[in-house]
Image: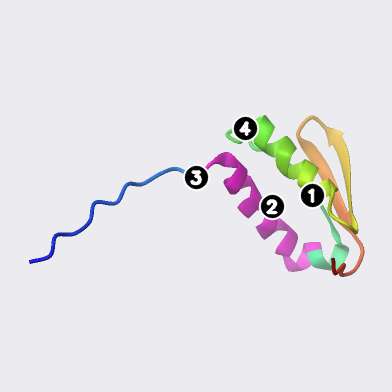
Amino acid sequence: MLQRPNFTSTTPHTYEQIGHRVQRILADPKAQKTQSVTIGRLPDERPEDWRRLMGEIAETAGIHLDEMDEGIVRITWTGYCES
């Protein structure tokens, strides 16, 4: 009989968690209609991961990022940009 492999469970890095959360927020139909969102870093998200992701978003053509307070940003965009 074949033995079942032992899988280990790892917790995703907060960078990946933040990325998935922000992606869901940006894909929301209301956000798509207004072409803007205001989001903040959650307490369990590492500040360095938050800054890294926000920096990458800010470098994307057609996207504007305004820092409002520590860990709070407003992301706006206009239309579809193809790179």
- Could you tell me which secondary element the residue under label 2 belongs to? helix
Near mark 2 (Cα within 10 A), the count class, few <14, some 14-19 or many ≥20, is some
Residue 38 — which label?
none
- The reply to whether the C-beta atoms of the residues labelled 2 and 3 are less than 8 Å apart is no
Are dots 2 and 4 in contact, CB under 8 Å? no
Which of marks 3 and 1 precedes in the sequence? 3
Q: Is residue 67 left or right of residue 11?
A: right
* Magenta run includes residue 4: no
The quarter of the picture where the N terminus appears is bottom left
Q: Which residue is mark 4?
A: 46
Q: How is the image coloured?
A: rainbow
Magenta residues span 12-31
Q: Earlier in the sequence, mark 4 or mark 3?
A: 3
> Residues under labels 1 and 3: Cα distance?
20 Å
| Secondary structure state at the residue bearing disc 3 | loop
Quadrant hosting residue 27: bottom right
Numbered badge on residue 12? 3
Residue designated by label 2: 22
Residue at 72% across, 64% down: 28
Three-letter amino acid code of the residue under disc 4:
Arg
Quarter of the image where one finds residue 24: bottom right
What residue is disc 1 on?
57
Look at 84% across and 48% down and name the residue there: 59
